[in-house]
Image (cartoon, grey):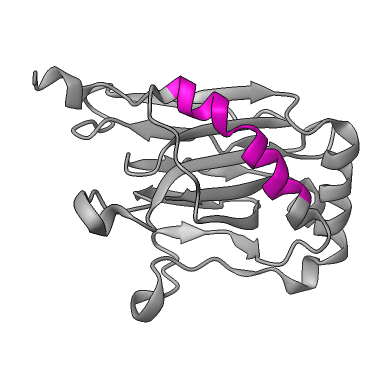
Amino acid sequence: MSEAVFAKPPAHGRIANWLGPQISQRLLDHAQEQRENFQVSAIGSGESKRIDLSLRQSRRLRHLGDLEDELRGRARETLSAMFQQFGAARFEPSKFELEMVAHGDEAFYGKHRDTNVLTGPKFNNRRIISAVYYFHRVPKAFSGGTLRIYSFVGDQDTGAFIDVEPTNDTLVFFPSWFPHEVLPVVCPSGRFEDSRFAINCWIRR
């Protein structure tokens, strides 16, 4: 296999108007109602889970109420498009992980992967597809917050990455083992309701 394969950014998909204005507004309303329950975003999992503000600054909400089942259902309906985009064999997910994240002024998430690169039996029950749904108030009151997805050997100097703007009511998905980051957000008002909101969905094998 040519090394050039590892220097290319991954295949990714984008679906505009994924949920529509009504559900998008319900998500905004839920965020506002639950704003006091958003917690500082952590990194890692299990015993390695920790808060590291040098790597990640945002706030997240794990409980989405009645919206959870709807979002999982929509994600399941989109699986065929995801598999087709990646040219991958279909599998039955073991789990759809969900969280809502608010990126306010100066928030970001440094370069990271959502899963380990594993094969064989250990590949089961791992995050395979990362999907992000963007929503925000209209008109948009922030700038920045671009999702940057890297190749395996790419960095800011090689140009081996793609940038995806956080467009309202848009779903973006990509393989979970590719490095990626959220570039800093600029939100002049500093108000919570003006944040860059997203639903992170990880699809496990």
Residue 83 part of the magenta-drawn span:
yes
* Residue at x 64% of width, y 40% of height: 75
Q: Position of residue 153 (x, y in %)?
A: 18, 33
Q: Position of residue 111 (x, y in %)?
A: 35, 47
User: Within the image, what quadrant is residue 22 found in?
Assistant: top right
User: Within the image, what quadrant is residue 166 found in?
Assistant: top right
What secondary structure do most residues of the magenta stretch adopt?
A: helix
Q: Position of residue 8 (x, y in %)?
A: 25, 21
Magenta stretch?
70-85
Above or below, comparing residue 28 to residue 125 in the picture = above
Above or below, comparing residue 151 to residue 53 in the picture = above
Is residue 195 visible to the viewer in this orientation of the structure? no
Left or right of 25 in this view: 165? left
Residue 74 part of the magenta-drawn span:
yes
Above or below, comparing residue 67 to residue 8 in the picture = below
* Residue at x 85% of width, y 32% of height: 138
